Amino acid sequence: MVSWPICNCFPVKDTSHVSFTASSKCHFTLVSAFSPPTPVVVTPLLQGVWTGYGRYDADVLESDLASKKCVPCSSKDLRPMTEETANILIKRVPGWNLVKENDSWKLHQSWKVKTFAKGMEFLRLVADVAEGEGHHPDLHLVGWNNIKIDIWTHAVGGLTENDFILAAKINGLNLHNLLRITPTDK
């Protein structure tokens, strides 16, 4: 099986069929036993994985998720992503965890806030971002100071790129003055 490097983000297991040079653009060639060499050029802002059989999936794996816009859930092309893709993308949204619930994958994160009022402010800031994206997570204020957020695309019953975009945008919010402690995994 051929492995591939992308801007040093993914380990190379078998270098006998792969050439790679790092520069302002990453140039590399992927070769399989079934096809001639396929050159691929990726700009530094795009990173992805070779999905096999001549496909390079850069759209799903763009490194700057926060700069993207969620697509409408009514899109005919919207499908739940594979667990493999979710495991790659989760690395791009620090603090979030993949959780499997009722045969569906979700993104989850928990925080502790200073006061009940700070918790309500936290939820309002997240709700404003979610409304702007047209993508709505499950928001919970449990007790007086525990915030829990679950994100998944209800319309497809699993994770889509929209979920990671929203998680990245939430990560970009300035919430530190509201938090009692750092994010938790509870």
Image (cartoon, grey):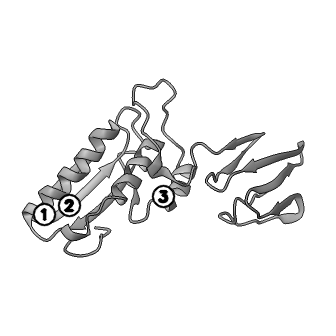
Q: Position of residue 112 (x, y in %)?
A: 20, 69
Q: Is residue 141 left or right of residue 57?
A: left
Label 1 element class: helix
Label 2 element class: strand
Foreground: disc 1 or disc 3: 1
- Residue 147 tag number: 2
Crowding at label 2, few (<14), some or many (≥20) Cα neighbours within 10 Å?
Answer: many
Instruction: Say which label, 1 or 3, has the lower sequence index.
Output: 3
Mark-to-mark CA distance, 1 and 3: 27 Å
Q: Position of residue 117 (x, y in %)?
A: 8, 61
What kind of residue is marked 3? Ile
Mark-to-mark CA distance, 2 and 3: 20 Å
- Residue 18 is drawn in which quadrant? bottom right
Instruction: Say which label, 2 or 1, has the lower sequence index.
Output: 1
Q: Which residue was labeled with disc 1?
A: 118
Front residue of 147 and 158: 147
Q: Position of residue 90 (x, y in %)?
A: 48, 58
Indicate whether 177 appears above or below 65.
below
Crowding at label 1, few (<14), some or many (≥20) Cα neighbours within 10 Å?
Answer: some
Q: Is residue 4 left or right of residue 124?
A: right
